Image: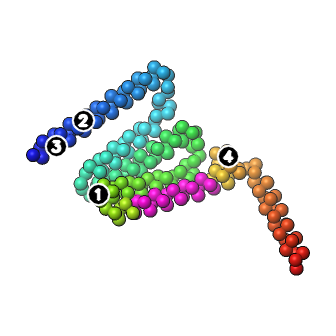
Amino acid sequence: MSSGNDKRSQRDANLTIATLLILAGVVALVAQFVRIPLGRYMWPFSVIVPGVLLVVLGLGLRNQASEGLTVLGSLVTGVGMVLFLQNLTGLWASWAYSWALIAPGAVGLGQAVYGTVRDDPAKVAEGWGSMRAGLWMFVVGFVFFELVIGLSGFGLGKTSWPIVIIVLGAVLLVRSIVGHSRD
């Protein structure tokens, strides 16, 4: 009986792959006709697709390598997603802090997905903890690099620092004068 189930799941997998290939071909053909430079925007999918395949492979296996493949696939997919967003926005300098979305963020996502599929609450909790840590590291990095330093050209940046220093000096001066007059 398992032979029939194996044949059915193989057929389902083939149908899914065939459908995805046809869909990808149609999208590429339409993009050529309407002159959308897919290669310019879609190259990160050469990283995303292998990552997703590793996740699917890891979740499909039932051996010691399955968790490692799932987490590795999540990590590779995370790199591809960050590259995709950076490619769209042109904010390549965001690597200074976006790495936190990948490790520990995407690593935690892989652990949580693996734990959910394998019904392992400890893995799910560990994964969520890693994702939260990665998100907080990203937020702190974003605030520091973008809003304080102005890495990508917005935020306080180089030109605002003299104003911040003047305001800080003025606040300290007023506090010291007001505090001195109370004595």
Residue stretch rendered in magenta on the structure: 126-144
Name which residue type carries label 2. Asn
Q: Is residue 148 visible?
A: yes
Please report whichever mark, 3 or 4, sits nearer to the chain's N-terminal start.
3
Tag shown at residue 118:
1
- Residue at x 35% of width, y 29% of height: 23
Q: Is residue 68 visible?
A: no
Label 1: element kind:
loop
- Is there CB contact under 8 Å for labels 4 and 1? no
Tag shown at residue 154:
4
- Residue at x 45% of width, y 43% of height: 80
> 10 Å neighbourhood of mark 2: few (<14), some, or many (≥20)?
few
Q: Specify whether 86 is left or right of 76.
A: right
- Residue at x 12% of width, y 46% of height: 2
The alpha-carbon separation of the residues under discs 2 and 3 comes to 12 Å
The alpha-carbon separation of the residues under discs 3 and 4 comes to 56 Å
Give the labeled residue for mark 3.
Answer: 6
Q: Principal SS element in the magenta part?
A: helix
Asked which quadrant contains residue 178, the reply is bottom right
Seen from this angle, which residue lies furthest right? 181
Q: Specify whether 149 is left or right of 160.
A: left
The alpha-carbon separation of the residues under discs 4 and 1 comes to 44 Å
Seen from this angle, which residue lies furthest left? 1
Please report whichever mark, 2 or 3, sits nearer to the chain's N-terminal start.
3
> 10 Å neighbourhood of mark 1: few (<14), some, or many (≥20)?
some
Name which residue type carries label 1. Arg
Label 3: element kind:
helix
Name which residue type carries label 3. Asp
- Is there CB contact under 8 Å for labels 1 and 2? no
Give the labeled residue for mark 2.
Answer: 14
The alpha-carbon separation of the residues under discs 1 and 2 comes to 25 Å
Quadrant of the drawing holding the C terminus: bottom right
